[in-house]
Image (cartoon, rainbow, N blue to C red):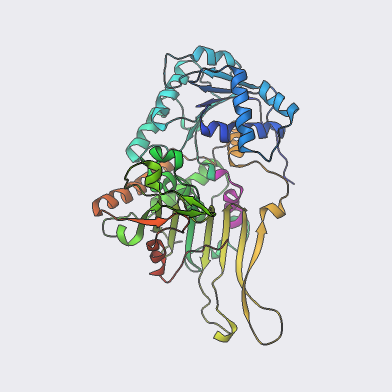
C-alpha cells in the first residue's frame, strides 16, 4: 500500500480565497492533506481576498462550504480545530500594489528557507500584476512558487503576454501552471500503463492502432458561469488545456525518465507535430455545437441561451479529428470531443486497435469487434481491455465481447488524494512534472488559434443539440464517414 509522506513545512497563500475554486477545491484539499498527516504543524495557510472578514469569519465560511460540498464526509472536530489554527485571513486586493501587503507579510514565516506557495485563484488578466506585487512587497524568496490556474490567456498573444509578465518577477522553475487533469490517478497511470507493461509499448503505434478517442463530457451546463463561459467556449475552455494534455500523454515518445523537463520535452514534440487546421480542412474535421433545452436525469435542463439571457454564437460542444504527423502516428486519427449538458459526466480515453486480418469463425458465431483499451478518468476510474472470447456452453461457437476490468474503487480501497490535493503537495515538493511549461501552453494555443481562425474565415456553422444527448448528429457523422463510431458505453 502506498505511504503518504509528509512534506516540509510551508506557507500557502490563496488569492481569491472567497471564490468558488478556493472554497470548493483548495481549502478542502488542504484540509484533507492535514487530516492525513501530510502537512506539518508549523505550516501556515492564508486566505487572501478583498472581502472584509476576520480570520474567525473566514474559518467559519470555509467550514460551512466544506460541509456543503462534502456532505458525506463528517468533520472530526479535533482535526478541524488543528487545521483552523493554521488558517488565517488577510483582506487584500492582490492586483493593487497599494493594498495591505504588509499585513500579509506579517502572517508569513520570515524564515527564508521555508517554502512559500502563492495560489492565483484569480482572473488570468491580473497574473502579471499579482506576481509583480508579491516581489515588490518583499515576499518573494528563492523557495517561492506561484501557481497559475488555467486558462493561461485567451489566445496565443495573451498567453505570451501573461507568461512574459509573470516571468519578469519569477523564474520558470518557480511557475506552476496547473491543469487538475494532470493530477488524476488514471491520467498519471497512462505513463505507467504504456511504459511499464511490455505488452503495450510495442503495439502503441500506427501499425496496430486504428484510432484514438478522447472524450471529456459534462452533464452540467454553463449555469452561473454563462457570462464568463461565453467569452471562451468549449475549444478554449477544455480543448486547449485538458484534452491537449491527455493527447500528449497518449501520443508522446518514451521519456528517458520521469524528470519534469524530460517528460515535458516529449509532450512539446507532440504539440508541434499536430497537423494545423486550415480553411480547407476545418469544415470536414471539426464540429461546433450548442445545447438547447432538454432533460437530464429526468429533470428539465435549460438551453445555453436561456442561461445566458441572450443570443450567442459560442460553442458549448466541439468535436475534432486531429492528426499527429510523425513516424509513430502517421495515418492514425485522434478524435477529440468535449461538451456541456451531455447525457452523462464521463471522461474516457479509448485506444482502438485494428481488426484482425482474417476471421477464423463464420458470421453465425456473432459480430467480431476490435480490441479496445478504455481508460476511464471519471467517474468510476478504471481501465478496461475489451476482448473477444468464446461464450461458454454447448451449441457451437458463439462470440462474446467482454472486458478485462481494473476498477480503482475495487482494487484500491483506501481513499487517496484527489487531483488538487496531489498537485498542491507536488508544488511544495517543487515537482514540476505534473505542470505545464511555458512552451507547452503556447504551442497548444498556436494550434487552437488556427482552428478559431479557420472557424471564423469559413463561418463554420453552430449545430444545436438537445441537453441530455451526446452532442449534435454531425459529431457522430464525423466518425461515421470513416466507418467508425464514438465509444459511449458506461
Q: Which span of residues is magenta-colored?
A: 182-194
Residue 32 placed where, x, y %?
67, 35
Residue 282 placed where, x, y %?
31, 57
Residue at 51% of width from left, 17% of height from top? 52
Which image quarter is the C terminus in? bottom right
Q: Quadrant of residue 478?
A: bottom left
Viewer-proximal residue among 385 and 24: 24
Residue at 34% of width from left, 47% of height from top? 314
Whether 8 is drawn above or below 279: the answer is above
The answer to whether residue 160 is left or right of residue 394 is: left
**Per the image, is 187 magenta?**
yes
**Per the image, is 214 magenta?**
no
Viewer-proximal residue among 77 and 480: 77
The answer to whether residue 439 is left or right of residue 6 is: left
Whether 370 is drawn above or below 42: the answer is below
The answer to whether residue 407 is left or right of residue 156 is: right
Residue 10 placed where, x, y %?
62, 25
Residue 53 placed where, x, y %?
55, 18
Q: Is residue 236 visible?
A: no
Q: Is residue 213 visible?
A: yes
Q: Quadrant of residue 375?
A: bottom right
Magenta stretch prevailing secondary structure: helix
| Count of all numbered marks drawn on residues in the image | 0
Amino acid at each position: 500500500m502506498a505511504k503518504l509522506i509528509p512534506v516540509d513545512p510551508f506557507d500557502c497563500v490563496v488569492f481569491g480565497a472567497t471564490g468558488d475554486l478556493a472554497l470548493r477545491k483548495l481549502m478542502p484539499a488542504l484540509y484533507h492533506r492535514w487530516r492525513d498527516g501530510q502537512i506539518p504543524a508549523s505550516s501556515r495557510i492564508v486566505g487572501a481576498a478583498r472581502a472584509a472578514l476576520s480570520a474567525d469569519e473566514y474559518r467559519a465560511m470555509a467550514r460551512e462550504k466544506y460541509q456543503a460540498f462534502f456532505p458525506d464526509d463528517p468533520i472530526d472536530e479535533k482535526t478541524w480545530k488543528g487545521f483552523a489554527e493554521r488558517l488565517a485571513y488577510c483582506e487584500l486586493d492582490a492586483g493593487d500594489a497599494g493594498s495591505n501587503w504588509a499585513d500579509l507579510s506579517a502572517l508569513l514565516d520570515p524564515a527564508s528557507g521555508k517554502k512559500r506557495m502563492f495560489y492565483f485563484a484569480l482572473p488570468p488578466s491580473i497574473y502579471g500584476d499579482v506576481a509583480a506585487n508579491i516581489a515588490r512587497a518583499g515576499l518573494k524568496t528563492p523557495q517561492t512558487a506561484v501557481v497559475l490556474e488555467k486558462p493561461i490567456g485567451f489566445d496565443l498573444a495573451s498567453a505570451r503576454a501573461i507568461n512574459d509578465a509573470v516571468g519578469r518577477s519569477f523564474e520558470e522553475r518557480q511557475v506552476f501552471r496547473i491543469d487538475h487533469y494532470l493530477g488524476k490517478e488514471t491520467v498519471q497511470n497512462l505513463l505507467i500503463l504504456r511504459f511499464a507493461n511490455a505488452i503495450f509499448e510495442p503495439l502503441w503505434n500506427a501499425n496496430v492502432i486504428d484510432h484514438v478517442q478522447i472524450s471529456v463530457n459534462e452533464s452540467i451546463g454553463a449555469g452561473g458561469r454563462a457570462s464568463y463561459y461565453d467569452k471562451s467556449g468549449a475549444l478554449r475552455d477544455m480543448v486547449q488545456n485538458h484534452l491537449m494534455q491527455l493527447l500528449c500523454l497518449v501520443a508522446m515518445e518514451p521519456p528517458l525518465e520521469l524528470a519534469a523537463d524530460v517528460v515535458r520535452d516529449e509532450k512539446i514534440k507532440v504539440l508541434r507535430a499536430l497537423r494545423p487546421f486550415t480553411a480547407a480542412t476545418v469544415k470536414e474535421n471539426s464540429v461546433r455545437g450548442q445545447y438547447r433545452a432538454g432533460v437530464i436525469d429526468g429533470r428539465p435542463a435549460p438551453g445555453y441561451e436561456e442561461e445566458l439571457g441572450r443570443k450567442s454564437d459560442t460553442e458549448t460542444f466541439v468535436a475534432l479529428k486531429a492528426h499527429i504527423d510523425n513516424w509513430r502516428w502517421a495515418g492514425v486519427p485522434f478524435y477529440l470531443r468535449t461538451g456541456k449538458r451531455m447525457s452523462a459526466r464521463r471522461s474516457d480515453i479509448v485506444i482502438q486497435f485494428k481488426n484482425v486480418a482474417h476471421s477464423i469463425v463464420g458470421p453465425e458465431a456473432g459480430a467480431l469487434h476490435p480490441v479496445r483499451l478504455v481508460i476511464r478518468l471519471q467517474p468510476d476510474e478504471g481501465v478496461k481491455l475489451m476482448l473477444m472470447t468464446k461464450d461458454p456452453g454447448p451449441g457451437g461457437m458463439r462470440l462474446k465481447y467482454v472486458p478485462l476490468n481494473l476498477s480503482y474503487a475495487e482494487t484500491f480501497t483506501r481513499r487517496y488524494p484527489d487531483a488538487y490535493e496531489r498537485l498542491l503537495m507536488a508544488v511544495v515538493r517543487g515537482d514540476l512534472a505534473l505542470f505545464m511549461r511555458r512552451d507547452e501552453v503556447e504551442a497548444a494555443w498556436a494550434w487552437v488559434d488556427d482552428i478559431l481562425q479557420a472557424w471564423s474565415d469559413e463561418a463554420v456553422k453552430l449545430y444545436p443539440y438537445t441537453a441530455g444527448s451526446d452532442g449534435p448528429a454531425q459529431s457522430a457523422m464525423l466518425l461515421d464517414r470513416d466507418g467508425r463510431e464514438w465509444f459511449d458505453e458506461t
